[in-house]
Image (tube, rainbow, N blue to C red):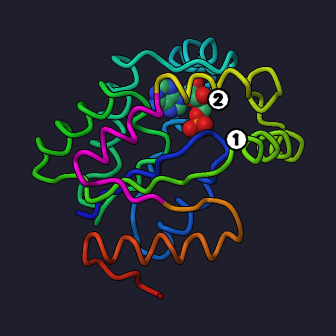
Amino acid sequence: MLNVVLFGAPGSGKGTQSAKLIDEYGLYHISTGEVLRDHIKRGTELGKIADSYISKGNLIPDDLMIQILDDVFDKEANGKPGVVFDGFPRTIPQAEALEKLLAKRGTDLAAVIGLEVPEDELMNRMIQRGKETGRADDTPETIKNRLDVYHKQTHPLRAYYQEKGKYLPINGSGVVDEIFNDIAAGLEEKTGVKCRIH
Ligand code: AMP
């Protein structure tokens, strides 16, 4: 399997670049944010719990999030050529759990693609997305908290994966296709896997 994490602050373009990775490498997409939003839409018990965290811009507790990921992986991703993890892990315990989850299934993480975008650009992109899509947590106050949470709880993963030699830094500002070309070139160098199209 070719398993990659798309890593970056909220608004860094993880969703957009995931879609391209899926198209061009034939990978399976797991976006924990989308899984949770789907539960909220369907009004499940889990959705009600998730909403109380998401609406404030806080993270779902690790134990619960890890359990959800485990279930989704077994239901949807087993037997696929690989997975793009989008929005997971967001904490060190989640990263450790991911490593165990993959090892238990005889596979591992090939690379962590880090989309790096300046803070003011992140803010503008999310405000714009909120206007265009009506996404409930793209409001100025919640965005501010999501960025704070990112810096405190998620950003330490950058050093964690750098130390493991897995981190692939990518300049996430600019034209979507050019950013994707940088990702494809970086992945090929790191893993030897060629993009289907490029
Ligand atoms: P996203 O769509 O990835 O920006 O996620 C939207 C929201 O879902 C986040 O602000 C969190 O509240 C929640 N969420 C998504 N993924 C995770 C995760 N790995 N750990 C904890 N909370 C998460």
Work out whether residue 116 or residue 28 is closer to the camera in this orientation and state it. Answer: 116
Q: CA distance from mark 2 to mark 1?
A: 9 Å
Query: Mark number for residue 147?
Result: 2
Give the amino acid type for the residue marked by disc 1 in the picture: Glu
* Residue 195 sits in quarter: bottom left
Residue 36 seen from this side: no
Give the amino acid type for the residue marked by disc 2 in the picture: Leu
Q: At 30% across and 24% down in the image, what residue appears?
A: 93
Q: Is residue 65 above or below residue 82?
A: above
Q: Earlier in the sequence, mark 2 or mark 1?
A: 1
SS of the residue at dot 1? Answer: helix
Q: Quadrant of the N terminus?
A: bottom left
SS of the residue at dot 2? Answer: helix
Q: At 41% across and 84% down in the image, what residue appears?
A: 196
**Picture coordinates of residue 23 (x, y %)?**
51, 72
**Picture coordinates of residue 81 (x, y %)?**
28, 66
Q: Which residues are magenta?
A: 154-169
**Picture coordinates of residue 64 (x, y %)?**
38, 18
Q: Do the CB atoms of the residues marked 2 and 1 lie less than 8 Å apart?
A: yes
Residue 109 seen from this side: yes
- Which residue, given by chain and number where applicable, does mark 1 sit on? 119
Asked whether mark 2 and ligand 1 are closer than 8 Å, the reply comes as: no
Q: Residues within 10 Å of mark 1 (few under 14, many from 20)?
A: few
Q: Quadrant of ligand 1?
A: top right
Work out whether residue 156 or residue 107 is closer to the camera in this orientation and state it. Answer: 156
* Residue 25 sits in quarter: bottom left
Is residue 160 in the magenta section? yes
